[in-house]
Image (tube, rainbow, N blue to C red):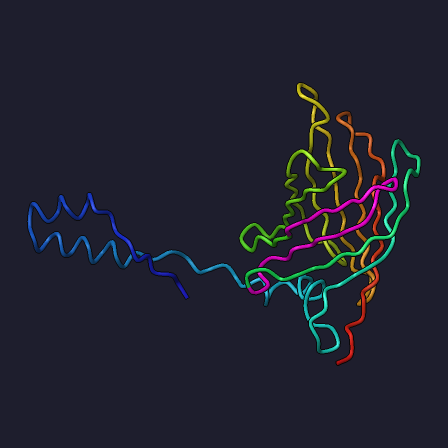
Amino acid sequence: MARRIAFFSPIASDLAMQRSPLVGLLVIAVLGSFRLGPAPQDPQTSNDLFEALAGKWQGKWQGKWQGKCKTWSAGRLVDESTVEGEFAPLLGGRFVRHSYLGSMRGKPRAGEETIAYDTVAKKYQISWFDAFHMNHAIMFSEGEKTGKGFAVLGSYRMAPGQKSWGWRTEYELRDDLTLVITAFNIAPEGREEKAVETIYQRVPPANK
């Protein structure tokens, strides 16, 4: 259904009322009945991926995952550690929060992503910060749906005055129990290298 705007222009209505009370009432009625186009479709009905990540599984709400995280630097594996993550629905499932805890070279590492699906642009969006990788700013990424998930592209700066580096993140829900999140570092000249890979296994809901 079309949405009705509940406000009107006070300047236009005041000028009209000064000229003629009847004209003023007509202006208010017209402005008050102005309609926007159809509201975007509810992601809960258009995006099954969010429900798969944070929604119902075997009849119960369960968004807890655990697994292994590998980190590469300049093509060399520099860390491999366990990680625990949770996907929680926000605003009735319109958004999803991904929070995780792990370690990096023996030090605690935590991070958080907010995932959205823009129903107008038909694109996935992520805002991300992390205790190791993005510990100085929030990265915003955007991208398209893929066969079993989505891929988004963002950017960051190594230092003031330097060119931006790219950061591509791929989400792949291989099956009901396995989620793979892979990130690639992209140098300013275009060279691309695998940077982080998280392989999650869904934690079955506890029987009550």
Toward the bottom, the furthest residue is 208
Residue 132 horizontal side relative to residue 96, left or right: right
* x and y, in percent, of residue 189 in the image: 77, 25
* x and y, in percent, of residue 143 in the image: 67, 46
The magenta stretch is 92-114
Q: Main secondary structure of the magenta part?
A: strand
Residue 201 horizontal side relative to residue 151, left or right: right
Q: Quadrant of the N terminus?
A: bottom left
Residue 31 horizontal side relative to residue 61, left or right: left
| Quadrant in the picture for residue 129 | top right
Toward the right, the furthest residue is 76
Residue located 79% across and 43% down the image? 183
| Quadrant in the picture for residue 62 | bottom right
Residue located 87% across and 34% down the image? 73
Q: Quadrant of the C terminus?
A: bottom right
* x and y, in percent, of residue 203 in the image: 81, 66
Residue 35 belongs to the span the image colors magenta: no
Task: Out of 164 and 92, give the one closest to the viewer.
Answer: 92
Residue 7 horizontal side relative to residue 183, left or right: left
> Is 58 situated above or below 155?
below
| Quadrant in the picture for residue 173 | bottom right
Task: Out of 15 and 110, give the one closest to the viewer.
Answer: 110
Toward the front, the furthest residue is 107
Count of residue discs: 0
* x and y, in percent, of residue 195 in the image: 83, 39
